[in-house]
Image: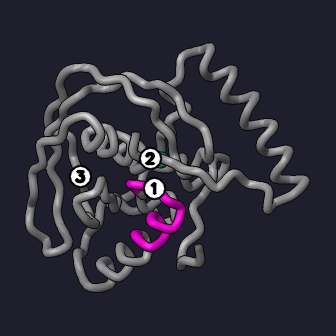
């Protein structure tokens, strides 16, 4: 479970700030994404945004089963439909909520070679992109809850934070965005 980065948890102010555009796509950035992928696989998760490891830049890594990928300076161009999915987050450990978001999106960004890429994504991949985009904008999944879900969430998070204060090792290590 040892990896270079520690995933920041809800309450950490870095998760609430808008990340900056990446200005240089180079070997240093590629090395960072390798470390982030190690961290993501160790958790385990299927996506990890730079602010989640304290890096305030607009990129994320992901792997939905087709191998590791990085998307840099992403922008969602179009979105369509509705899809419900039990969404979790490595920064809000162990909690999942049914959230409705657009089912399909068109996203563009840059890969590690500096090439512009456009990806049409549906269902899980689309959800992952929307979730990671939120992280780049300082938004967490608790911001998408309805009032009842939010009350539940706050209660659970308070209990969870009490536990962490009593015993920092007693953190539920699951799961983040996981495959259904
Ligand atoms: Zn997340």
Q: Which residue is mark 3?
A: 74
The residue located at (36%, 23%) in the rendering is 84
The residue located at (43%, 25%) in the rendering is 99
Secondary structure beneath dot 2 equals loop
Determine if the C-beta at disc 2 is less than 8 A from ligand 1: no
Q: Nearer the viewer, residue 23 or 59?
A: 59
Left or right of 106, for residue 169: right
Q: Nearer the viewer, residue 74 or 179?
A: 179
Residue bounds of the magenta highlight: 37-47
Residue 61, position as x, y percentages in the image: 34, 62
**Tag of residue 45:** 1
The residue located at (12%, 42%) in the rendering is 120
Determine if the C-beta at disc 3 is less than 8 A from ligand 1: no
Residue 114, placed above or below residue 72? below
The magenta stretch spans residue 42: yes
Secondary structure beneath dot 1 equals loop
Local crowd at mark 3 within 10 Å, few (<14), some, or many (≥20)? many
Determine if the C-beta at disc 1 is less than 8 A from ligand 1: yes
The residue located at (49%, 69%) in the rendering is 39
Mark nearer the N terminus (2 vs 3): 3
Quadrant (top left/top right/bottom left/bottom right) for the N terminus: bottom right
Residue 104, position as x, y percentages in the image: 19, 31
**Tag of residue 178:** 2
Residue 86, placed above or below residue 110? above
Whole-angstrom CA distance, mark 3 to mark 1, is: 20 Å
Disc 1 vs disc 2: Cβ atoms closer than 8 Å? yes
Mark nearer the N terminus (3 vs 1): 1
């Amino acid at each position: 479970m040892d990896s270079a980065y520690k995933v920041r948890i809800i309450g950490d102010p870095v998760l609430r700030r808008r990340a900056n555009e990446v200005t240089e796509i180079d070997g240093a950035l590629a090395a960072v994404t390798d470390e982030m992928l190690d961290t993501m696989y160790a958790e385990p998760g299927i996506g990890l945004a730079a602010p989640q490891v304290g890096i305030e830049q607009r990129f994320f890594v992901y792997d939905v089963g087709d191998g590791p990928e990085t998307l840099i300076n992403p922008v969602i161009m179009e979105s369509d439909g509705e899809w419900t999915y039990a969404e979790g987050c490595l920064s809000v450990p162990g909690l999942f909520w049914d959230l409705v978001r657009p089912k399909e999106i068109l996203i563009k960004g840059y890969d590690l070679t500096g090439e512009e890429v456009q990806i049409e994504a549906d269902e899980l991949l689309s959800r992952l992109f929307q979730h990671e985009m939120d992280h780049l904008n300082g938004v967490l999944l608790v911001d998408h809850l309805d009032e009842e879900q939010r009350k539940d969430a706050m209660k659970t998070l308070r209990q969870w934070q009490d536990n962490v204060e009593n015993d920092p090792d007693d953190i539920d290590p699951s799961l983040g965005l996981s495959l259904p």
